[in-house]
């Protein structure tokens, strides 16, 4: 089931964890977030604030026996709705943190960067219609990474 809401930030996701994840009793949750934190969709956020929100979501899920898949933040050379904002460095920093935190917390890090990113840290041509939001081909690439992890969990 998909419970993602476009444009949301991690603090908004934390608020929905009980109703939209825990109460539905899934075996696992795939958390893909961070783009909108970096963009400041609900106001300026530091990476440390994003880290805290990922920690909270992971802790809540695991406390209820739900395995956590922490997805890398998809690459983006810029955000069309926030021209001039540095995106590549904060995305890379958040992805490094997610990788390390997943190892510490017994979560699984799902790294989409190798299949989606170009050499400059943006989305490869043809994989996003605006450099951020995936096209059908972009979602196919994401699925190719995610499906083996789901199959290993009997999905």
Image (spheres, rainbow, N blue to C red):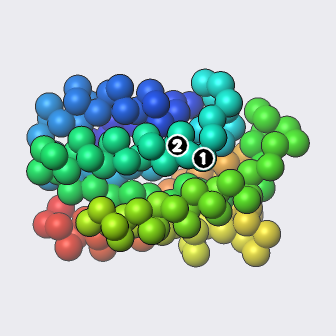
Badge 1 marks a residue whose secondary structure is helix
Badge 2 marks a residue whose secondary structure is helix
> Which residue is depicted at the point 19% across and 50% down?
62
* Residue 115 appearing in the image: yes
Q: How far apart are labels 1 and 2 at the CA level?
A: 5 Å
Seen in the image, is 39 located left or right of residue 64? right
> Which residue is depicted at the point 44% across and 27% down?
12
Question: Which residue ends up furthest to the right in the rendered image?
Answer: 84
The tag on residue 109 is none
Asked whether disc 1 touches disc 2, contact meaning CB atoms under 8 Å apart, the reply is yes
Q: Is residue 9 above or below residue 69?
A: above
- The x, y position of residue 19, in whole percent, is 23, 26
* Residue 135 appearing in the image: no
- The x, y position of residue 44, in whole percent, is 68, 30
The tag on residue 47 is 1
Seen in the image, is 104 located left or right of residue 42? left
Seen in the image, is 3 located left or right of residue 88? left
User: Mark 1, residues whose alpha carbon is within 10 Å: few (<14), some, or many (≥20)?
Assistant: some
Location of mark 2 (residue): 50
Q: Where, quadrant-wise, is the N terminus in this rendering? A: top left
- The x, y position of residue 92, in whole percent, is 64, 63
> Which residue is depicted at the point 45% across and 68% down?
100
Foreground pick, 26 / 1: 26
> Which residue is depicted at the point 66% across and 68% down?
117
Q: Where, quadrant-wise, is the C terminus in this rendering? A: bottom left
Foreground pick, 114 / 36: 36
- The x, y position of residue 6, in whole percent, is 51, 32
Q: Name the quadrant containing residue 21.
A: top left
Seen in the image, is 29 located left or right of residue 4? left
User: Mark 2, residues whose alpha carbon is within 10 Å: few (<14), some, or many (≥20)?
Assistant: some
Q: Name the quadrant containing residue 74.
A: bottom right
Q: Is residue 78 above or below residue 49?
A: below
């Amino acid at each position: 089931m998909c419970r993602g809401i476009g444009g949301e930030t991690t603090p908004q996701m934390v608020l929905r964890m009980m109703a939209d994840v825990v109460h539905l009793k899934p075996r696992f949750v795939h958390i893909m977030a961070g783009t909108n934190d970096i963009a400041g969709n609900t106001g300026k956020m530091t990476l440390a604030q994003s880290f805290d929100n990922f920690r909270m979501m992971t802790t809540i899920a695991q406390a209820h026996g739900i395995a956590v898949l922490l997805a890398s933040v998809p690459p983006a050379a810029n955000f069309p709705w926030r021209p001039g904002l540095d995106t590549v460095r904060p995305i890379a920093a958040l992805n490094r943190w997610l990788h390390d935190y997943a190892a510490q917390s017994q979560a699984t890090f799902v790294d989409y960067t190798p299949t989606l990113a170009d050499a400059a840290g943006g989305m490869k041509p043809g994989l996003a219609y605006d450099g951020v939001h995936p096209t059908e081909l972009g979602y196919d690439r994401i699925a190719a990474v995610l499906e083996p992890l789901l199959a290993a969990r009997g999905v």
